[in-house]
Image: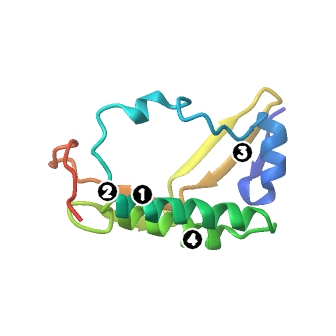
Amino acid sequence: MVTTIPVGNLSMEDLIYKFKLRRVVDEQFFTEWLTELPEITEGETTILDRVKSNYFSLIEHPPMSESIVKMVVLSPVLDLAGFYQPPFRVKGESSVEIFIEDEGGEIIKGQIDVLVLLPPDVDTCHRVQT
């Protein structure tokens, strides 16, 4: 029998246990993120280092709310990437649902909190200059 669990009923500890998650600091973990990327400026690096530091400061004092993570981490990164500017559109609390079924017959159901849309008529290689 399949059990559906709303994602809001799970803690980060639950997800770590269920999916055997672990923090990876190896820069080679996602090698596809390291190829054909635009160079980032020293100022952008400083901002990203600050966001990373802010995030790790948050996780030292659980529980942390989803809204605080979005404010402290997601918002500055979306801004830095230029996703608040045309041609992109940002939607919050989108009704899109994600279903993940694990081996135990559970379905974890949730929503995408922030969705960045790129109109289909825009070249996907487009980079917004900030």
Q: Considering the numbered disc 4 on the image, is that residue within a helix, a strand or a loop? A: helix
Question: Label 4 crowding class (10 Å Cα cut-off): few <14, some 14-19, many 20+?
Answer: some
Kindly identify which numbered label has been placed on residue 72.
4
- Label 4 sits on what residue type? Val
**Numbered disc total:** 4
Q: Image quadrant for the N terminus?
A: top right
Give the quadrant of the C terminus: bottom left
Residue 9: name its quadrant.
bottom right
Please name the residue that numbered disc 1 is placed on: 45
| Point 78% across, 49% down: residue | 5
Whether residue 92 is visible to the viewer of this picture, yes or no, is no
Comes first in the chain, label 1 or label 4:
1
- Picture coordinates of residue 40, whole percent (x, y): 32, 52
The residue to which callout 3 is attached is 108
Label 1 to label 4, Cα distance in Å?
A: 16 Å
Mark toward the start of the polypeptide (2 vs 4): 2
Residue contact between numbered discs 2 and 3, judged by CB atoms under 8 Å: no
Side (left or right) of 44 relative to 49: left
Q: Do the residues under discs 2 and 1 have CB atoms within 8 angstroms?
A: yes
Q: Give the residue drawn at x 74%, y 54%.
A: 6
Which residue is under mark 2? 41
Residue 4 % position (x, y)? 77, 45
Relative horizontal placement of residue 106, taking residue 51 as reference (left or right): right
Mark 1 or 4: the one toward you: 1
Q: Give the mark nearer the N terminus: 4 vs 3.
A: 4
